[in-house]
Image (cartoon, helix red, strand yellow):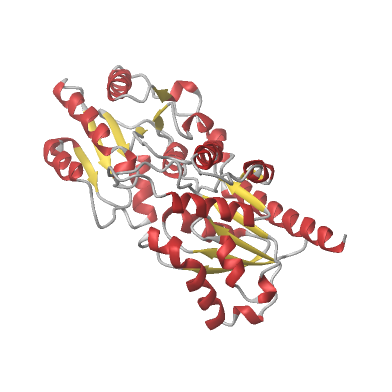
Amino acid sequence: MTARRVLAIDPYHGGSHRALLDGWAERSRHRITPVTLPPYHWKWRMRHAPVTVRDHIRRQGLDRQTWDAVWCTSMLNLAEFLGLAPRAMRRLPAVAYFHENQLAYPVRHSDPRDAHFALTNLTTALAADRVCFNSEHNRDTLLGGLEALLAKMPDHRLPGVLDQIAARSVIVPPGIQLVPRRASPLPGPLRVLWAARWEFDKGPDAFFEALSELDRRQVPFRLSVVGEQFGEVPEGFTRAHRVLESHIDHWGYRASRSDYEAVLRASDVVVSTAEHEFFGIAILEAVSAGCVPVVPARLAYPELFPADFLYDGTTTGLVERLTALARQKAAGVRLQPPPVSLVERFSWTHASEQMDDLLEQTVRISCEVSRA
């Protein structure tokens, strides 16, 4: 098989973005050269990345090398970059990977959504030969959101562009690093895990409200709250630590992968109260370790799990679900996570091959069109 030379651009190289590119580059049959920027100030990254990346390419001498394709995340305005890029790069086939889109991300404050970032998503998708989404939810909310946005335009509403994007779109889930599943059930009360980012869009207030209700009902449980933290941590975490302190086993980000996996294997259930989730890597990793997912029947979760593992998305529904699981465990009933096969389909073994094949197909089609 041909090993293609791929210039991979990630202007926000952190979290799931970093995990995807690093994981793919490590396993790919192609020769992937990353060009990345640190994961800070995402709005500014989207604004200046085309120029900054262009300058990085020149300083590193990458403009003097030969490439077969460009790959980027949706944090790059691909159309702007190609307009600014060295001449030899402008006609390269391009693949854009959408970890998220700026039409479905919840707005925290009362300010209206900044349509500029949504239009950046639009132009990136139009500039790419293939547009990859990590879930159907991501693709559908982008297309639906763009349809509503374009309808507000006073004129020139870009007829046909959404069909163009849909026609070149494909679902490519990211790879996950499977965690060896524990062999035996855990002793003691129900062990509840939070593995999401410590940010408002993951719905921490609803999560802690549900656990506080369990505490008031005297439902026994233990609690581990891990996941990445950033500069501004929602106040609810400090308050919850004080209120739920007697239940806490683990609190805070686990920088060591082995420590993180140990916490996953020491948990019975992993909970999401997310208002925004385009895939759910942390949830799937916890499930691979043996956790029962307790996730809302919204966002990308219905694509990942059968209905038995979904709750109605309300705090009351979460409380009832956790109470039922706590009672089952107290009665000696072994909790049953989804089968290993459910998460194995998202392993890097499958994901890297799918991404490699898509890249190869994109390059081959581009070459055929050029020769025609």
Near-viewer residue (294 or 286): 294
Q: Is residue 351 above or below residue 220?
A: below
Q: Is residue 49 above or below residue 161?
A: below
Q: Is residue 319 above or below residue 125?
A: above
220 sits left or right of 59 in the view: left
Q: Is residue 144 visible?
A: yes
- Quadrant housing residue 47: bottom left
Q: Is residue 12 visible?
A: no
Of all residues, the one furthest to the front in this rendering is 155
Q: Position of residue 167 (x, y in %)?
A: 69, 43
Q: Is residue 5 above or below residue 299?
A: below
Near-viewer residue (142 or 356): 142
Near-viewer residue (103 or 233): 103
Residue at horizontal 64%, vertical 45%?
161
Q: Position of residue 28 (x, y in %)?
A: 64, 59
Residue at horizontal 50%, vertical 37%?
148
Near-viewer residue (111 or 42): 111
